[in-house]
Image (cartoon, rainbow, N blue to C red):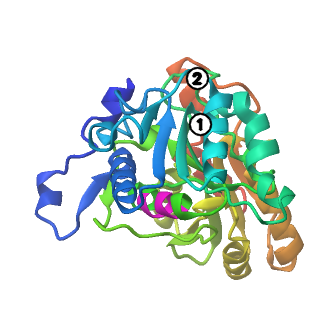
Amino acid sequence: MSPDNIFEGANEVSDDEANSDERKLGYGAAVVETMAQIMREDESVFVAGEDVGAHGGVFGYFRGLQPEFGEDRVVDTPIAEQAIIGLGIGSAVQGLRPVVDLMFMDFICVAMDQIVNQAAKLKYMFGGGAKLPLTITTAGGAGLSAAAQHSQSLEAMLCHVPGLKVAMPSDAYEVKGLLTACVREDNPTVFIINKRKLADTCHVPEELFEIPLGEGHIVREGSDVTVVAIGRMVDEAKGAAEKLSDEGIDCELINPRTVQPLDIDLIVESVSKTGHLVIVHEAVRFGGIGAEIAAQIQEQAFDYLDAPIERVAAPFSPIPFSPVLEKQYIPDVERIVAGIKNLF
């Protein structure tokens, strides 16, 4: 599936949606709308990255911004990730609010020195005297047969770095609320867009609003098991919860929304009620964010657990190009169902 096919229809609504009271918007289109509204509100905000201007980015989530705001505020850059992040850091320190795009999440590895040793640390090294309102947008996740170098979920690497905040919206509503919060934040943030979600629609208010960074959401209340799902895995976990409901297992589904800061209190409260925990993420299981959540629950809510914590994640392997193998690689409803059943 090509990027254009993914984005196609993201601005459209069905006849049923058009006749409903809820305004619905596509996940990718929510990025465009949010950025346009923020840029109209605040002239210090600008966008920079490879192909973000003339082409609206490789996945189209900056389409239409350059015609409205011009080449000075929607800047096409060379293929140079270190330079893109360096541009963001320098302009942020000087008082602007840059949104810099790294096409694929895998490419953060090229700019890790700038991200980890400069962006994340400058405020600390200046004794709090420097603001760094930098937002890094990037597309993560598998499912497009983009192979091992364009499909990774590397959020755990970023979460490990003090000074960075990391948001992973699961739908278009969260795209708008979290992106607004990231751009208005005075510290560096990484906003991870999921490539497979771009054309998915849901209710999104037209006006700007913020979802606080570090505030999770209970997607579905339940009494038997807590399921913490990250990013696109929220959809798969919903499907698993619905399937298990028919079998008499009542799942409480939690979406952290941001993985740094992490709303561990919400998860502890849920586990204290259900006594069981399953963590689902698309990244590889070893060293993933699920391991950190499991460790903190063991420290804070061990006495409430009635079974070992279960993790459902990708195998410790590069992501295959083959669609058949890739489908087996990514956690899905059936694997989540099996993981939950392991606890009972």
Classify residue 141 as left or right of residue 64: right
Q: Residues within 10 Å of mark 2 (few under 14, many from 20)?
A: few
In the rendered image, residue 243 lying in the magenta stretch gets the answer no
328 is higher (above) or lower (below) than 214: above
Q: Residue 61 is drawn in which quadrant?
A: top left
Q: Earlier in the sequence, mark 2 or mark 1?
A: 2
**Picture coordinates of residue 308, whole percent (x, y):** 82, 62
In the rendered image, residue 179 lying in the magenta stretch gets the answer yes
**Picture coordinates of residue 29, whole percent (x, y):** 32, 47
Mark drawn on residue 78? none
The reply to whether dot 2 and dot 1 touch (C-beta < 8 Å) is no
- Residues 262 and 180: in front is 180
Viewport quadrant of the C terminus: bottom right
Q: Residue 320 is drawn in which quadrant?
A: top right
Viewport quadrant of the N terminus: top left
Residue marked by disc 1: 330
Classify residue 295 as left or right of residue 180: right
Residue marked by disc 2: 325
Magenta-colored segment: predominant secondary structure: helix
**Picture coordinates of residue 94, whole percent (x, y):** 63, 52
Residue at 81% over, 52% down: 121
Classify residue 57 as left or right of residue 241: left
